[in-house]
Each structure stands twice: as structure tokens, then as C-alpha cells.
Image: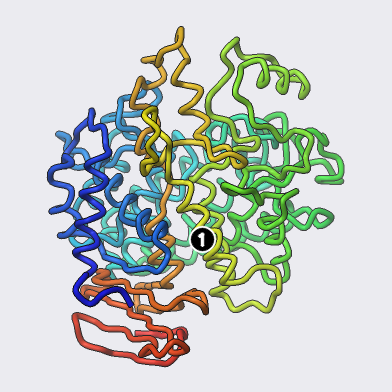
Amino acid sequence: MKTKTLTSRDILSQHVAAFNQTDEETIIQAIPNRQAEAWMQAHIPCVMLPDPMLEQTYYFRWWTFRKHIKNTPDGTVITEFLPSVPWAGKHNVIDASCCHHIEEGRWLRDTPILDEYITFLYRSGKPPRNYSNWLEYAVLELCEARGDPSLGVKLLPNMIQNHKGWGLERLHPSGLYWSVDDRDATEFSIGGKGGLRPTLNCYQVANARAISAFARASGDFVAADRYGVLAHGLAERINRLLWDEKARFYKALPLADRNDQIPQDGFAAADPRRNVREIWGYTPWVFGVAPKGRADAFRQLLDVNGFGATHGLTTAERRHPGFGLFYTGEELNAWLVSRGESPIGPQGHECLWNGPSWPFSTCLALKAIANLLDSKEEQHCIHASDYVGLLAQYARQHIRRIPDGRIVPWIDENLNPDTGDWIARTRLSTWEGGTWAEEKGGYERGKDYNHSSFCDGVIGGLFGVRPSLREIRISPLFPACWPYAVLEDVPVHGHLLTICYENPRLGGAGYRVALDGECVFASNRPVTFHL
């Protein structure tokens, strides 16, 4: 174990001091750097981990999350970008990332900020459908952490209205949802601009299930059954139409528009330039849609011709001829022309999903792995050690070498999986005559980017804290070689949960769980435990 005189609160304090010292703070919202430690001490669960980079990144992501809390006349909101960007909505809010904010923020002590933020998303005047998202399900996850469905019950009419809106705007004659890559926040993906994509369809399964749960909690059993049936039918269509049996993977099925008929031969008839494995093929496992027997898809995560790379998971399989890591407009435009599409201008675009590693998709892939492992399905394709290895790789992405040569903690947009360079940062730094372009967000664009989760992958994945409305289940994924792992003061069901692990092979006390400081479970090995 770490020295007995150094507590997790001491570790938090040390990390925050280091983050503040290296930060260039130019945009301040509700909580400035000088208040960061006090806020974190009051609100976040603490960890002690034997992997220094994993531990540092955990605290760094809470430190950056805090930067995005913003007070407005409409209540507290959480932003994606620190600078104002023209494609954002009111108060600079973007619904593409809101679910990551909620899933991360559900582990904070005292979370009224999330209630205000979620209410704003539903009731600000513009429906939260600018980008595909799983908002209803994210609210359910928050309520499950609390053990209290009241927020979801209060917003149930808004949720039902939102779900109907998706149907009016995006429902395809097949009964699946049609979307474009840009509206999935995955611009310039190999799979093409339009089609039946695993993303929105899986989100809608999860959203319908959440509405069913909240309707049942409210006593509306008719609505509960109706949305349960909708979710079941949509899941069946995803598994039948979006699973490519030959490739053993879920894919986007390209279509010209929302009224196109699905070709009888499915993926066999798809344009080979767009027929590709992409990382959002794991969303069926994120949202409980995939049936047993398809876990061999996870081999692609570790395959260097699939999604595996030195510095992070790629967004498209490397073996596909459309895979690219572009730094110039010429490269992107040549790629577009090769696909029968029109070039978009001399500079091209800074956000590409045809190969770079994105934290947005990495955290979802990790959640898919954790869910598969938690299901106890018999498979030999992915293991707990792989989850921890990929989580550690994800943590190591969180650095940048600044002009004076120092390496500092960092989170940005899209990463070069071969070099670790933040591609959008490199490109945008000289976008407009060698300077930052204001219409792209300016100098702060991408810095401390809040477009993914990380701490949720530590608490919910590594430590395996999995609450439902009725119980708290713990199913950890600790590596056998780790000497210790500590998670302190996670708020669940009105209690503060602490998990301590000391490897018994190294003379440690084993695995202990405490609620409000009182030990409620002890074992000499990590096991699934129900509270």
C-alpha cells in the first residue's frame, strides 16, 4: 500500500496543485482554478491506484469537468467547449456530449447541478435532438445511482415527447432510425453520410427502456409496457439488419436517404467504399442490445489491423482502404473524391472519424467491454486484463508537449493513434493565416474538451459499481497483479460507498466494502457483491 501518512485527500490536493501550476487559465466559468481543490474535496470520490498515470488522469478529468460547470439565468449547465462555438445552442450547450456529462456527474456528491442541467436540456425551448444521444437512458443511470426515480418521473412527459420527435424526424420504413454521420457527431466517417447506424438505433432502445422504467415507477403501466415493446422490437431489428454475419460485426448500412429501401442482400450489396467496421459497432453492448454469441467482435479491439494502435483505439478498422489520418485539406479532399463525394474547400476539416482516436468513442468501447465481462457470457475474446490495459492506454493519451518542451496533462479532440499528437489542435493552431480561427472557437478550442467520460470507466468499470433502482451491485475488474486499489466516498442510494482492495497474494487483507464507514462485506478475492 501507499505510505500510511498519505491519504487519498492528500493525493487529490497534490494533483490539483500540479494541474493549476501548469494550466493557462483564460476562460473561467462557475469554478475557477483557485477554487478547484475545495470543490473537488467536497464533491468527488477519491481513488488510490498503483498505476500513477491512471490515478493522475482520474483526478485530471474531474479537474477539467469542473471547468465546464456554468451558471446561467436558466440554471446550471455543463458545456462541451470552454469557448463559445457557433454550432452550440443556448448557453453554449451541445447535446452531443450531454450523456457523458450525466454519466460522469452521477458519481458526484450533491448533484443538483445535474437536475438543473437535465431540466434545461428538456425544457429550454429547443428539443435535445440536434445530435444523436441517449439522454433518457443517462437520466435513468443517474436515478439508479441515487436509488430514486423521481427526476425521471418528473420529466417523463418531456421524455415521451422527445422520443416521439425522434420518430417523426428519423424513423425509416424498416422500423430502424436513419441518421447521418455528422448528426451522430462522427463527421467524415468511412461508413458514409447517411444510413441505418448502430448509434442512434441503440440509443433509442436504451431511451425506450428508460421511459418504460420511469412510466412503471409513476404507476403508468400501459405506457411502461408500450415502451418496453418498442424497445424489444427495435433491438430485434438491429440484431437482424445491422449485424454483418460475414464480418462478425455491427455496421452502419449506407442508404441514400431516409426513404431508401434496404437492399435484399444487405451488406453484401453495400458500396465497398462504405462497408466497414467502425468502432460504434460496439454500441449494442453498451446499451444491452447484443445477444450472446457475438463476442468475437471484440477481437477487433486488440487487432492492429482492426482498432488496435499504440496510442489509442482507432475509429475505423485500419485494414479498410478508406482509413486515414489527415493533416491537410488536400488529403481530405482527395479522399472525398475517391468516394464519389465533393471536396469541401482548401482547408478541409479538423474533425475526422475515418481513423483518428477519439475519447468519445474510446470510453464507449470500454463500457462495452465492461458490460460484456459483467454479463459472465462464456467467451475467450476479451478479458479483464484487456479492459484494464485499454483503460490505462486511454489514460496515457491525456498528455501534450507544450512549446517550452514540458509535458502537461491534457484532453482535446481527436488523437493520432500512432504518434499521440492531438490532430485538431495541430491543425487549428495555424488554420487562419498561421493563427487560430475565431469561427472555429479560437485559441481555447478543444482545450479541456468535455466530450467523453473517464472517471465513469474507473468507478463503474474498474471498480464495478453498478447500481440499479433497487440494489447496488459491485463487480470489479482488478488485475491479479495489482497490490491495491481504493475508491472512497462514492454516493449511491443515499450512502457513501468505499471499496478497498489489498492483494491477498501479497499479504493484503483482500476485498472490503463499507457503507458510511461501516464494513458490510469482506472477501479474500474480488467477487460480484449485492447490497
In the rendered image, which residue does mark 1 sit on? Answer: 367
Q: Nearer the viewer, residue 38 or 490?
A: 38
In percent of width and height, residue 98 lies at: 37, 44
Whether residue 261 sits left or right of residue 419 in the image: it is right
Question: Three-letter amino acid code at disc 1?
Answer: Lys
The residue at 60%/43% (across/down) is 177
Whether residue 379 sits left or right of residue 149 in the image: it is right
Whether residue 387 sits left or right of residue 18 in the image: it is right
The residue at 40%/33% (across/down) is 405
Q: Residues within 10 Å of mark 1 (few under 14, many from 20)?
A: many
In percent of width and height, residue 486 lies at: 33, 74
Q: Nearer the viewer, residue 485 or 380?
A: 485
Task: Tell me if I can see residue 223 in this picture.
Answer: no
In percent of width and height, residue 503 lies at: 43, 84
Image quadrant occupied by the N terminus: bottom left
In percent of width and height, residue 357 lies at: 57, 42
Task: Tell me if I can see residue 491 in this picture.
Answer: yes
Mark 1, secondary structure of its residue: helix
> Tell me, what colour scheme is on the image?
rainbow
